Image (spheres, grey):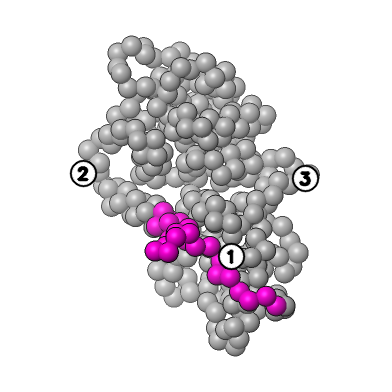
Amino acid sequence: MDAISSEAADLKYSSISPVLVAASSGAAMMRAGRTIDASGLRIGARLPIEEALERIKAQPAATAVWVELDRDCGDRMDELLSQLSHDASRGCYAAIISATSSLLDPINACVGDAEIEVVVDADETERAAALAIALARRESPLRLSDIGSDRNAERLRQLSEEVGRIASTLARLSAGPSGPRPSVVPMPAGEVPQLPADVVRNVIRARRLRARFFSEELFADPAWDMLLDLLQAEIAQLRVPVSSLCIAAAVPATTALRWLKTMVSQGLFIRRADPLDGRRVFVELAPEASNALRRYFAEVGQVAAI
């Protein structure tokens, strides 16, 4: 493993609480440092994954904890991420995890639906956006260095709109003019229609074929794509891990993870730990969501549901 300095910066020169950075390699630490520096915040300590847990427990105050992962660090990584999940749920600090797609499953097994920003194979603008979102959640200041003149400013604006869209959807699903509203429209009691597996497969295939003729961005609808994938898996009696569901969403993994959290929070999806692998989580449709989808397909009949 590359050597990483664990010496803390002078914590007296500023009233702003520091950002603690934990990384799995020297290269990962350098990348995390660039993101933090660009934010205008200061780094309180640069720590290898193996030392980060003890430091976080001992740190009196921190604006955020940024974890940069470019490899699997095993049990120590799992312990650190579990601590982040616990602390984030209590609002102790903002937490951001940046990782490669190969680590999606072990990360999600540890952090679950905690208020942690997870970015996957992200570019610098996506990383800056994740930090901004995490700090805004705690009402902490963020000063991106001259972001208005940055060549990626348009991408940052798009990411902000994406997050706003998810938040608006969540609000619309959870409440309306007349008060709380369920995510799934109640249906009259009765037998749930049978649904052949090939019907759902054909719909998924038709949705993917659109990319041959148009840009995929025109049709991005990760919530619907994930619903269809889980329905297909349910019919085939297959289990779907988080990493596979993110691929099915047909959007960047970071976006898919945000939608996944929204769907779980609304009771549409259920997370279940893999009994044979503690570092993997499966996702499945909630019974109400499954019934609603089956009734939907029965209602549309021969009409192409795409």
Q: Disc 3 on helix, strand or loop?
A: loop
Q: In the depicted view, which residue is nearer to us: 298 or 225?
A: 298
Residue at which label 3 appears: 275
Please give the name of the residue rendered at 68% of the width and 45% of the height, measured from the top-left corner.
Answer: 280
Residue 184: in magenta span = yes
Please give the name of the residue rendered at 36% of the width and 12% of the height, measured from the top-left corner.
Answer: 10
Between disc 1 and disc 2, whose residue precedes? 2
Three-letter amino acid code of the residue under disc 1: Leu
Please give the name of the residue rendered at 65% of the width and 51% of the height, measured from the top-left corner.
Answer: 271
Q: Disc 2 on helix, strand or loop?
A: helix
Residue 270: in magenta span = no
Q: In the depicted view, which residue is nearer to us: 293 or 125?
A: 293
Question: Residue 230 lies in what quarter of the image?
Answer: bottom right
The answer to whether 194 appears left or right of 176 in the picture is right
Between disc 3 and disc 1, whose residue precedes? 1
Q: Residue 149 carries which label?
A: 2
Q: Give the range drawn in magenta.
A: 166-190
Near mark 2 (Cα within 10 A), the count class, few <14, some 14-19 or many ≥20, is few
Residue at which label 1 appears: 227
**For the residues marked 1 and 2, what is the alpha-carbon distance in whole angstroms?**
39 Å
